[in-house]
Image (tube, helix red, strand yellow):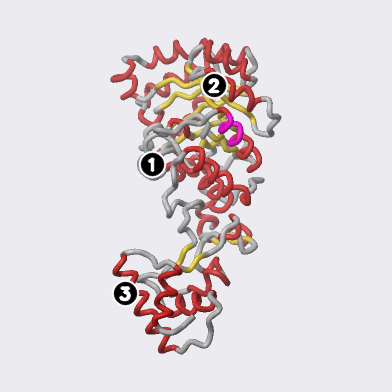
Amino acid sequence: MENKYMQDNKWWVSPYNFVDEVIETFDLPQKVEIHDATLRDGEQTPGVVFRKEDKIHIAQMLDEVGIERIEAGMPAVSEEDFQAIKEISKLGLKAKIFTFARALPIDIDKAIDCGADGVVIEIPIGYPKLKFQFDWTWEDVLRKSVDCISYAKEKKMHTLYFPYDTTRAREEDLTNLLTRIMQDAPPDAIGIVDTMGCALPEAIKYMVRKVKELTGLPIEVHTHNDFGMGVATELAAVTAGAEVVHSCINGLGERTGNAALEELMIGLQMLLGIETNYKFDKLLSLCKLAEELSGVKPAVNKPVVGVRNYTRESGIGVDLVMKTPLAMFATAPQFFGREGEVVLGKKSGKASITYTLEKLGIQDVSDQTVAEILMDVKAKGTEKRSLLTLDEFKEILAGKGIG
């Protein structure tokens, strides 16, 4: 069990994740893959535009990190999107390339012309969508789906059927639709789509089991983060047997975004104990590239990529931030090519002052002087309602004749 929750000074998570009473509730698949949709769903973040060169660069880096599937875009959107997908398909990446399609044969033709390996066929099934947006019944959805799925299969495309807003579908509609789909035009996989990010992890697990029972097909899960549970629901789906989880880098996506790629990667490896071949040392570069090209800056406390994730202001345990980081964090910053950071402010303690003095090469400062410096640091941090800069700290030292 030790190798699961703690590994080589890289991470140390809860051992209770791996006790028998927890593990025996899991139905993990033999293999889990990540399908990244940054180039399509991530670009749907309001105000974000990825040009062709951007998409090619992101796709190459996703492949370097080891992501198994890349949703390269929707060729029907524009000629530039079409050409971007075509170029990505020619790169010879290890990742399989998918396109996004409406339930129309013309979109399947575009996917084929792009050289894609697979296609995601979207159509609504959520009851609010059917009732208020499309004025459809489940029978309408079935009728519009069958010919398109059959056409994609005839063309040897890996076909993911993607009845979106799945988590707000009436259960009888979903049951009827999938039962008939399996009779009339079975795809290669079924997507459970939490378009509005409104399902609990337990609800997603229920749906994975139900859809598997109805279809016997591999299940893919695509979630959004409207209730802050995008990653949690996808990890829950894996514990119920889902084989593919969808993501966007940095949690990009409409409204509150999609399940974040980087969080899914560490969740699969560290929390579920699934062995992966992902290159975690390349992850930060990928996330920074997406930030640069999208213009969307992650929150400073965003998991994995937030600039303050490994920052310690409180004086307690300051020495451990550098010497034994897993005493202070669940993941070692070095695992992602980062370093811990000690900062000064209202919550600092004597250890913070001593550490910063040593970092500046200043030694042999008395305890009394350290205490006085600490009082000045706390006062300055309170006054400015922020952290102190190094120059501000040096000013305090200069006032005491130090430095």
Report the side of 166 relative to 99 (left or right).
left
Q: Which mark is on residue 77?
A: none
Label 3 crowd (10 A; few <14 / some 14-19 / many >=20): some
Residue 206 visible in this rendered orientation of the protein: no
Q: Quadrant of the N terminus?
A: bottom right
Q: Position of residue 50 (x, y in %)?
A: 51, 31
Q: Gap between marks 3 and 2, in whole Å?
A: 56 Å
The residue type indicated by label 2 comes to Glu
Confirm whether the magenta stretch covers residue 54: yes
Which residue does the numbered mark 3 point to in the structure image?
A: 379
Give the image quarter of residue 156. Answer: top right
Q: Residue at x 48, y 17 (%)?
A: 102
Query: Which mark lies nearer to you, 2 or 1?
Result: 2
- 344, 164: nearer the viewer: 344
Report the side of 334 relative to 309 (left or right).
right
Label 1 crowd (10 A; few <14 / some 14-19 / many >=20): some
Q: Gap between marks 2 and 1, in whole Å?
A: 38 Å
Q: Gap between marks 1 and 3, in whole Å?
A: 45 Å
Report the side of 259 relative to 151 (left or right).
left
Q: Residue at x 57, y 49 (%)?
A: 284
Which residue does the numbered mark 2 point to in the structure image?
A: 80
Query: Which mark lies nearer to you, 1 or 3?
Result: 3
- 227, 39: nearer the viewer: 39
Magenta span: chief secondary structure: helix
Q: Say whether disc 3 or disc 2 marks the residue closer to the N-terminus.
A: 2
The residue type indicated by label 3 comes to Ala
